[in-house]
Structures are given as C-alpha cells and as structure tokens.
Amino acid sequence: MPGSFVSKNSKHTEKQDNYNDPEKLLSLLSSRSREKVLWVLRNKRVSKYVFKPSGRELWVVSGEGSDYLILGDYYCTCLDFYLESLVRIKRAYCYHIIAKKIAEITGNYRVYEIPDTEFENLISDLVRYAIDSFE
C-alpha cells in the first residue's frame, strides 16, 4: 500500500517469515479489523513503555474501548482476543496484536521512559481495564 503507514519503513525480504511483512499480517484479519489497525497506526495509538533503569518493556495498544496490554506477539488483554483466540479458537490474533507488530516493524509507535517504581502501577491499571471490559 504505497504511502500508507503499513509500508512505511518496513524492511523485509522473501526469506523473512510472514510475521515481518505488514501486508501479510493485515491479510490475517477481516476487512473491519484491518481498518481498525490502520486507524490505530494513523493515530499513533501503539505505545512502548521502557522502564528505567531495568530496561523492562511493555507494549500497550489504545483501541476503541480501552488500553490493552500486549504480551510478546501472542497475547492481548482484550475481550475479543479472549473469546475468538482462546475460547472459540477461531483466529490467532486480535487487531491489537497485529497493530503492535506492524508498529514495531515500521517504527510507528510512541516511546515512554518511566521509572521502574511505576511498573506495578501501570500493570495494575491495565489489568483493571482488562477485567472491567470482561464485565
């Protein structure tokens, strides 16, 4: 997609797997979810929190309803991931995970450096948001 956030700065070769190719990542989703990913990227709603001095990192995607913690490349705290990926086993990813992966590949995310003393507070807030979304 010329001129889009997806192709911007992405560097991949045929030897790299599909998970380093933004176009192939988008193809894993429905058209509605693809639009959500593009909206997230366009609005820079992917954040990487780097804790100092430990260097621990957390990724957060601010979606339509809340902020969602992404663990690695394979887990999201959103209700959609829980229902569609873990319970119904219909798909491996929600749009938040795909948005995080593409943002990481393209460099299209915000970085926040915060002290290690704030780690527990951030985790607590994100878990509380996740629990509230399940109710």
Image (cartoon, rainbow, N blue to C red):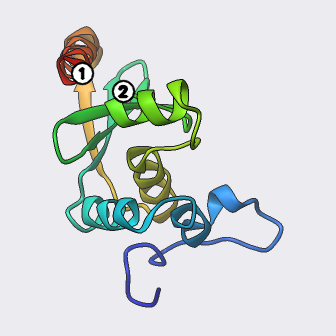
Label 2: element kind? loop
Q: Is residue 80 visible?
A: yes
Judged left or right of residue 24, residue 71 is left
Q: Is residue 40 above or below residue 21?
A: above
Residue bearing the label numbered 1: 126
Q: Residue 45's x, y, as percent?
A: 23, 52
- Furthest residue toward right: 15
Residue bearing the label numbered 2: 77
Q: Earlier in the sequence, mark 1 or mark 2?
A: 2
Between 98 and 28, the one lying in front of the other is 28
Q: Residue 123's x, y, as percent?
A: 28, 16
The 10 Å Cα crowd at callout 2, few under 14, some 14 to 19, many 20 or more, is many
Q: Is residue 78 visible?
A: no
Judged left or right of residue 90, residue 50 is left
The 10 Å Cα crowd at callout 1, few under 14, some 14 to 19, many 20 or more, is some
Dividing the picture into quadrants, the one containing residue 114 is top left
Q: Residue 112's x, y, as percent?
A: 25, 39
Residue at 26% of width from left, 21% of height from top? 130
Between 79 and 44, the one lying in front of the other is 79
Between the residue at mark 1 and the residue at mark 2, the CA separation in whole angstroms equals 8 Å
**Mark 1 touching mark 2, by CB under 8 A?**
yes
Which of discs 1 and 2 lies nearer the camera? The answer is 2
Between 47 and 75, the one lying in front of the other is 75
Label 1: element kind? helix
Residue at 56% of width from left, 67% of height from top? 27
Question: Which quarter of the image is occupied by the C terminus?
Answer: top left
Q: Residue 11's x, y, as percent?
A: 61, 72
> Of the residues shown, which amino acid type is indicated by label 1?
Leu
Residue at 75% of width from left, 59% of height from top? 17
